[in-house]
Image: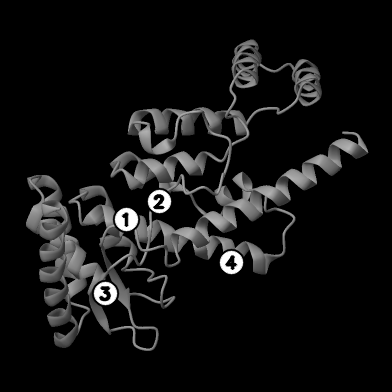
Amino acid sequence: MTVMGKAIAIIFSTVIIIIFTFFINHHLSTPSTNFTQKAIITTSTNQANDHKIEQADNQKALTLNNGSNLSVISDKPQHQATVSELLNKAKQIRVCSNIPQTDEEFSAWLETAYQINELPDRIVNVTDKYNKCKRNPDRNALYLDFVISAAEKGSEDAISWLWFIDGSELIKQLNLKNYKREEQRRIKQQFIELKYYLSETAALNLNETAILKLSNAYQHLDPKTGGQNYVKSLAYSDFFMQITKSNDLYGKVKWQRDRLEQRMTHDEIEQALTLTEQLLNDAQNTLAQ
């Protein structure tokens, strides 16, 4: 790659990080007053067991197209796209991010492929993907944009995808490899908090995938405290058991829930029961809107 090409690549990576950070901060900060009421779960920063449901007017906004021009995605605003369209775009962009990006890179890859006697089917497959990606106007966009938009619309597939994205995937997609570990950790933490919040919002719309993810996740990590949160884990388990119609999943969750309860104090169990009732009430209010 030429010196000019390296310079452009560095500038592009820096711009992507700045945009992504702005995007995450937007979702995790207080927006303007024209957003509808959201019910969210908050935890005291001083006491891990100070659990409550906070009905917060306009505390967090989930609007991707907020005027920030996060990336050039398409002529059609994302809020008008269907979940299927959003996820298809995300899949296409992710494929494009894992193959050569320029003609120079593709030629180098092809030369190496022939030298190592790469399988013909593999060469044909990569060549086909490269040609398709060259025609994709969104190939340089962040596929996370589309996944998050789909999650905002309540997509269970999008919620699952968000939980599939681990730290290494985030570093790869945002090109954070050469950034300091402190900066990497900061961005990872922001993404984790956003992932939990999107799941909590979806849970109030009875998104079973989101509820299951939270039930399991809080048993290992509460991003607000950095520790475990058995109270929320048990509450989401009970919440799931109250609303699911799947006998199979009900049985599995009950087994896990009963094991978790054995490790909790009486006070923690009582807190979880109270939280479950609050979740059910907030879900009812959300669905009634």
Determine whether label 2 and label 4 are within 8 Å by CB.
no
Amino acid type at mark 1: Ser
Side (left or right) of 55 relative to 157? left
Q: Is any atom of residue 27 visible in this view? A: yes
Kindly identify which residue carries mark 3.
230
Q: Residue at x 55, y 29 (%)?
A: 95
Q: Earlier in the sequence, mark 2 or mark 1?
A: 2
Which element is circle 1 on? helix
Kindly identify which residue carries mark 4.
186
Measure how far apart labels 4 and 3 are at the Cα level. 25 Å
Which label lies toward us, 1 or 3?
1
- Where residue 26 sits in the image (x, y, percent)? 49, 59
Determine whether label 1 and label 3 are within 8 Å by CB.
no
Res. 281 mark: none
Quadrant of the image occupied by residue 223: bottom left
Determine whether label 2 and label 1 are within 8 Å by CB.
yes
Res. 199 mark: 1
Image quarter where the N terminus lies is: top right
Q: Residue at x 53, y 54 (%)?
A: 23
Q: Earlier in the sequence, mark 2 or mark 4?
A: 2
Res. 163 mark: 2
Q: Earlier in the sequence, mark 1 or mark 4?
A: 4
Which label lies toward us, 2 or 4?
4
Q: Residues within 10 Å of mark 3 (few under 14, many from 20)?
A: many
Determine whether label 4 and label 3 are within 8 Å by CB.
no
Q: Residue at x 39, y 28 (%)?
A: 85
